[in-house]
Amino acid sequence: MCDNPGMQISDLPPSANSGNNLAAPDLIALADRCVQCGLCVPHCPTYVKTLSEADSPRGRIALIRAVAEGRLPANKRYDEHIDLCLNCGACEAACPNQVSFGTLLNQARSQKENLRRRTLPQRLLRKLAFGLLSHPVWMSRFASMLRVYQLSGVQRVAGRSGLLRKLRVDKLDEQLPRLSKGIVWREHYPAAGTSRGDVGLFLGCVARNVDTATLSAAIYVLTRLGYGVRIPREQRCCGALHRHAGETGSANDLENANVRAFSKLDLVAVVSTASGCVPGLIANRDAVSDLAGCTDINRFVADSDGWNGIAIAPSNKTIVVHDPCTLRNKLSGHAHPYRLLKRIPGVTIESLAGNEMCCGAAGSYFLTQPEMANSLLQDKIAALSSSAATVLCTSNIGCALHLAGGVRSAGMQLEVLHPITILARQMGFRDG
């Protein structure tokens, strides 16, 4: 237990221009569940880094409540502490009173966003970014433009000129993998052999453009296990990035669009290769549970009965497994990647040291909070350097891009792969 007595009002000096306060009885009700025991505090990555009570879950709850009750202004200092939260869920996993901190944080950010005054360029850039994420066709066209940007040499010139740093997109550029030609996904991939039913595959707004190998590997494994794969064209972004940024209305619209897209199909499950997307897909639990079970692909494939007769080639590689926060803290599914990898004869499987701490990707966090994100990333790179890894395995696209960027910057010769891709390769899948 932490000895700090709790958040003090003096930790957040009032602003000269306090602006509007957040009047939110629902926030107060959620905050009331916190008894300030402090069991969550040592599990919080930002508290571990800053040692500031205001950057702990307990401190943030106290801040949100104080602002909701009008005792503190929703000023810049308040924004800084709320925005620094990764929303990793480590505090919820440790909380004995089951405080819904993620819900509390998202609601606070949504109300805060309604009060925040942005410049016209900031508003336009934000609208463009979330618009791209919301519309798959726009995102695919943008990805095609990025591919030209990479192949033409413009990326190299822009990096050397310092332009990317001035535009504050240098971190995004560093994490951008080499983009391959886009794939036009079929709406149905039939099962190989006797069918066990159809599975819906959620593509995601990012993975469908930058991680096509993992999606193709998922189709390969699922069809060989006897499942047909359905990919409805109407599916959209899961809405997680929107919700975490306070764009609650847009997030709800996207979630409802996905429910409509998959609910008209006769499915045994809806699976995602990105663990970060699953909470968004199951946010509307009643609607989704009526159509199928939505789950992380690791869990679904690990639980499948279709393994009889499946040939899996042996491997002598050492695979170090990174646990995404969504898989560990929100889905309680971090054991399933290990179950999958254990099907490969001869492979050595290790957990990445410090797996209980976030890698710093956290959706768009690495862009909005680059210093904290990089500090957390360097902890992972240090842990990797001390391991015997030949492959780094992770189950979330955001974590994979963030970690791969760190691996490249460190000059490490290491592949960063999804467990389903590793398994598919040993089953005969060839990507690229």
Image (cartoon, helix red, strand yellow):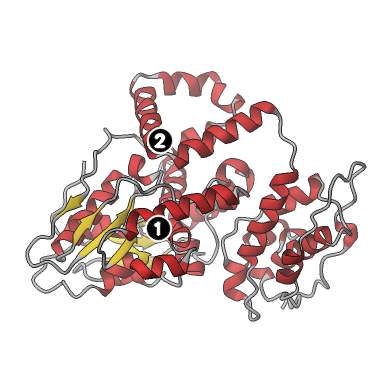
Which residue appears at 25% of the width and 38% of the height? Answer: 183
Can I make out residue 386 in this image? no
What is the secondary structure assignment of the residue under circle 2? helix
Q: Percent x, y for residue 167?
A: 59, 26
Task: Please state which of residues 1 and 280 is positioned toward the viewer in this rendering.
Answer: 280
- Mark nearest the camera among 2 and 1 is 1
Residue 139 shows which numbered tag? 2
Location of the N terminus by quadrant is bottom right
Q: Is residue 278 left or right of residue 164?
A: left
Which residue appears at 79% of the width and 65% of the height? Answer: 62
Location of the C terminus by quadrant is top left
The residue under label 1 is: 259
At label 2, the amino acid type is Met
Mark 2 nearby-residue class (10 Å; few <14, some 14–19, many ≥20)? some
Farthest residue, direction right: 16
Label 2 – label 1 distance at C-alpha:
20 Å
Q: Is residue 37 above or below residue 139?
A: below
